[in-house]
Amino acid sequence: MMPWWSWLVIWVVLVLALLGMFMYLGYRLFVKGMTTLRALGDLTEKTELLSRRFDDEPDPPFRPAVLGPTREYAQGWEERRATNATIRHTRREARVRRGKLLVSADPRRFSHLLRKRH
C-alpha cells in the first residue's frame, strides 16, 4: 500500500506536466499565428501594389453579344469551332500513331525469346 503523500506527488507531477504541455502548445500556436499574420501583411502589400498597377489601365467597354452584329459573333464562333476541331484531330492522330506503335512489333526484336535453350 502506498502512503497518502505519494498520491499527492503523482497528481502534482501530472498537473505540472499538463500545464507544461499546454504552455508548449500555446507557444507553438502563438508562433504560427504570428507567422501567419506576417505573411498576411506581406500579401496585403503585394495586393495593394497589384491593384495600383492595374487601376491605371481602364477596363474595356462592355458590349453584350445579344446587341452586337450577329454575323461577326457567328464568324468568331465558327473560327473557334474549327480551331478546336483541328486540335482534336491532331490529338487523335497522335493517339492513333502511338497505338499503332504499341500494336505492331518487329518480330526480329523478340527473336531471342524464340530460341530453344539446350
Image (cartoon, grey):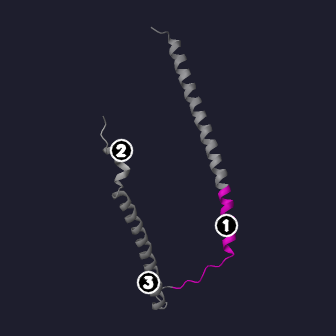
Q: Nearer the viewer, residue 85 or 94?
A: 94
Left or right: residue 23 versus residue 92 is right
Give the main secondary structure, helix, strand or loop, of the magenta stretch: helix
Amino acid beneath label 3: Glu
Give the tally of numbered discs.
3
Amino acid beneath label 1: Leu
Residue at x 64% of width, y 51% of height = 37
Provide residue 15's location: percent of width, then percent of height: 55, 25
Residue at x 61% of width, y 39% of height = 28
Task: Name the mark on residue 112.
Answer: 2
Question: Does residue 92 show up magenta in the picture?
Answer: no
Q: Which of the two discs, 2 and 1, labels the residue nearer the N terminus?
A: 1
Q: Provide the secondary structure element on which disc 1 rests.
A: helix
Q: Give the range drawn in magenta.
A: 42-63
Q: Provide the secondary structure element on which disc 2 rests.
A: helix
The N terminus sits in image quarter: top left
Q: Quadrant of residue 13?
A: top right
Q: Name the residue under label 1.
A: 50
Q: Which of the two discs, 3 and 2, labels the residue nearer the N terminus?
A: 3
In contact (CB < 8 Å): disc 1 and disc 3: no
- The mark closer to the camera, 2 or 1, is 2
Provide residue 44's location: percent of width, then percent of height: 66, 60
Left or right: residue 70 versus residue 63 is left
Left or right: residue 117 versus residue 9 is left
Dot 3 crowding, Cα within 10 Å, few <14, some 14–19, many 20+: few
Amino acid beneath label 2: His
Residue at x 32% of width, y 42% of height = 115
Task: Name the mark on residue 78.
Answer: 3
